[in-house]
Amino acid sequence: MGKVSLVKTHRGIKEGLSDALDLIGGLGCYVTHGDRVMLKPNLNGIEGCTNRQLVESLIQLLSDFSVRKVFIAESTFGDKNATNMFFHKTGYSELARKYGIELFNLNESEAVEVKVAKPLLLEKLRIAKEVYEADRIINLPNMKVHYATGITLAMKNLKGLLVGNEKRHFHEVGLDKAIVDLNNTIRPHLNVVDAISCMERMGPRGGDIINLDLIMAGEDAAEVDCIGCAVMGYAIDEVRHLKYFIEANGIDIGKINVVGERIEDVRHPFKKVTMGSIVPGKFKIRDKNACSSCMNAFLLSCSLLDGEPARFADVYMGSILDESETSGGMSIAFGNCCPDDRAFDIRIRGCPPFPFALKESLKRDADQGPILDFASR
Ligand code: SF4
């Protein structure tokens, strides 16, 4: 089994990164001179993104190492415009300009259809072609809780390498096993987790930011995630994609060699996402293939409501409607993906909808009656 390092950033982020890498053998174990290196941060939002200074420090270390090329690649939820907006708002466009490196918006990338190694669920995946133009992939997730997968760390972060509707397809077929298929197909050469500022209580967006001032590094994404789980106070069984991956690949967690800080000295039990305490009892969620952003936006929207809504409601998300028996309440279409040729009592537009839109549209429904088309953004 490999090593996973845990290093506090008290001496500075670049120093912390260097120490974290040295503890697992040094950058030279993971890249060679002349490599084309892809950096894959998490930029899926404005908060809860990979620390820019951490990525900048890595770019500097790689350039000292004389790699041939460094580039950053990511696709967020929504379309290429959403990804471009997050590149801009998170300061990554500026970072790329500063170092003269390319920033690839994988939401406009060509897909390479790849056969899945040891499939659990999917035979093929559509991966961005830039992945296959890199000699080395360095995965740079941010440590967060996630409403659907428990946590999001190294394994989950690879989802941003998928192209087009593939990300939503993962939700449709079963996210956890699809993530295992993805990780059995693409193995980053190095994983560096930004646990400097993390997100708890709600995620991957809209939660509370907490500072652990910690960097984790390791060669194997699943091993890094196992140690990340322990730091966050999660049992492996609570993170199904990790559990399935461990079972499929025979990983012996007890043999992971943790170097640097001891887990017990940096452990911070994260506040978990508890759906039951967020979604009103009168709402029935009917989601077959919505991406995590719509569900995340819906959870945020629910947390902004003033108590229980007046009426029962079936809340639809995604392009494929759940046609099973309804609750008999009103119908709400949440997000642009809900089909336009179907009538709903309330339609809330947006990709994803603005969090206050649900509250506002319910208020208008109560004041003015149903059949609303609420364009939130
Ligand atoms: S409308 Fe919702 S489900 Fe559709 S792409 Fe946007 S965020 Fe995802």
Image: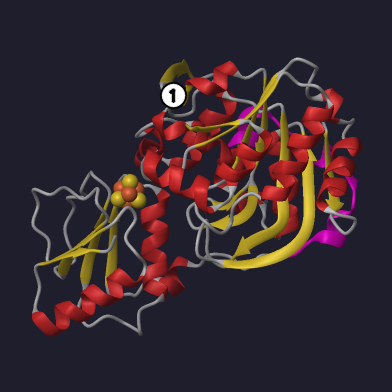
Q: Nearer the viewer, residue 138 or 122?
A: 138
Q: Nearer the viewer, residue 51 or 321?
A: 51
90 vs 31, left or right, is left
Do we see residue 252 in this rendering?
no
Image coords of residue 123 (percent x, y): 42, 21
The crowd level at tag 1 (other Cα within 10 Å; few <14, some 14-19, many 20+) is many
Q: Nearer the viewer, residue 186 or 210?
A: 210
At label 1, the amino acid type is Leu
Q: State the residue at coordinates (8%, 57%).
A: 343
Q: State the residue at coordinates (69%, 60%).
A: 197
Q: State the residue at coordinates (69%, 44%).
A: 225
Q: Nearer the viewer, residue 31 or 308?
A: 31
Q: State the residue at coordinates (73%, 46%).
A: 54
- Provide the residue designation for mark 1: 125
Quadrant of residue 367 in the image? bottom left
Q: Is residue 267 one of those drawn in magenta?
A: yes
In the image, residue 158 sits, relative to residue 129, either above or below, namely below
Please identify the quadrant where the N terminus is shown.
Answer: top right
User: In this picture, which residue range is highlighted in magenta?
Assistant: 243-268
Do we see residue 176 in this rendering?
yes
Q: Is residue 310 one of those drawn in magenta?
A: no
- Visual colour scheme: secondary structure
Please identify the quadrant where the C terminus is shown.
Answer: bottom left
Q: Is disc 1 placed on a helix, strand or loop? A: strand
Image coords of residue 97 (percent x, y): 61, 38
298 vs 370, left or right, is right
